[in-house]
Image (cartoon, grey):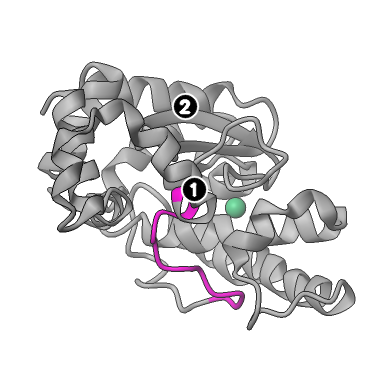
């Protein structure tokens, strides 16, 4: 689907029964969305809870690409610690999870301590990471996401190369991301440490659709210094049906 058709379709869907939309150019999109930056940023995607959720599969489910020991330590030690420290930081800094979504907190993270930034990011990033992976499956991005990938990166192969490079080239610890921007474009980038594209301090901004943890704790036991091999194998466990659903919700 061509860019203009996609934008126009989204606009018409968002406009619901407002027939007047039909007469407007797709170029009005950004100003329409700037009326509601919260929606533009979070894209109606379900909020991520403040507490660690059960892993949606067993520790060995991603073998042989990600080994069970790495998964166990990653989930039950590293990620669990981010969730615990986030809970402490919210109490200490007066954040109520009932009044403030994690996504809203991340959007205002510059107002909080480094402890909040590191652990709110760490918790959010891992909760998403577990869901965007799954046991090896044959699924590829669905039609809509494939069209958007082709539109914005040229081809699926060009997309995976660019995304993999973002992970390989992130110096030290961090994440590679595929995000959807407020004007419904796909963008690839990376963030250091546990930052993410929802944060007001991040250069890369958008709603994460896909994220790849390139901290050594995510791969060192099996891959040691060979981060590129980890990234190549990681594509085998991407849960494209989850990511495609996320994309479909984001453009509604
Ligand atoms: Mn990690």
Report the disc number at residue 209: none
The magenta stretch spans residue 30: no
Dot 1 alpha-carbon crowd within 10 angstroms: few under 14, some 14 to 19, many 20 or more: few
User: Could you tell me which residue is drawn at 77 percent across and 70 percent down?
Assistant: 85
Q: Secondary structure at mark 1?
A: loop
Q: Quadrant of the N terminus?
A: top left
* Residue 66 place in picture, x, y as percent: 41, 51
Disc 1 versus disc 2: nearer the observer = 1
Disc 1 to disc 2, how far (Cα)? Answer: 42 Å
The foreground one among 162 and 116 is 116
> Pointers 1 and 2 in contact (CB under 8 A)?
no
User: Could you tell me which residue is drawn at 14 percent across and 24 percent down?
Assistant: 2
The foreground one among 158 and 10 is 10
Q: Which residue is mark 1?
A: 35
The majority secondary structure of the magenta stretch comes to loop
Dot 2 alpha-carbon crowd within 10 angstroms: few under 14, some 14 to 19, many 20 or more: some
Of the two numbered discs 1 and 2 on the same chain, state the one appearing first in sequence. Answer: 1
* Residue 73 place in picture, x, y as percent: 59, 64
- In the picture as drawn, the residue positioned furthest to the bottom comes out as 98
The foreground one among 68 and 206 is 206
Q: Judge left or right: residue 243 versus residue 80.
A: left
Q: Judge left or right: residue 20 versus residue 177.
A: left
């Amino acid at each position: 689907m061509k860019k203009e058709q996609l934008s126009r379709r989204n606009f018409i869907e968002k406009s619901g029964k407002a027939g007047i939309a039909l007469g407007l150019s797709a170029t009005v999109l950004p100003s329409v969305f700037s009326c509601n930056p919260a929606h533009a940023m979070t894209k109606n995607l379900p909020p991520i809870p403040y507490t660690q959720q059960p892993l949606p599969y067993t520790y060995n489910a991603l073998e042989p690409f990600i080994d069970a020991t790495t998964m166990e330590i990653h989930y039950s030690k590293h990620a669990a610690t981010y969730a615990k420290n986030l809970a402490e930081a919210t109490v200490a800094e007066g954040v109520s999870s009932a009044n403030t979504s994690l996504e809203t907190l991340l959007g205002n993270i510059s107002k909080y301590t480094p402890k909040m930034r590191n652990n709110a990011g760490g918790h959010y990033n891992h909760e998403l990471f577990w869901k965007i992976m799954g046991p090896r499956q044959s699924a590829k991005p669905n039609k809509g996401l494939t069209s958007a990938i082709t539109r914005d990166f040229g081809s699926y192969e060009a997309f995976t190369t660019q995304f993999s490079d973002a992970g390989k080239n992130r110096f030290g610890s961090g994440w590679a991301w595929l995000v959807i921007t407020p004007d419904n474009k796909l963008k690839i980038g990376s963030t250091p440490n546990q930052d993410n594209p929802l944060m007001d301090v991040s250069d890369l901004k958008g709603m994460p659709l896909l994220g790849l943890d390139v901290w050594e704790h995510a791969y060192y036991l099996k891959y040691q210094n060979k981060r590129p091999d980890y990234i190549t194998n990681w594509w085998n466990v991407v849960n494209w049906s989850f990511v495609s659903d996320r994309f479909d919700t984001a453009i509604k």
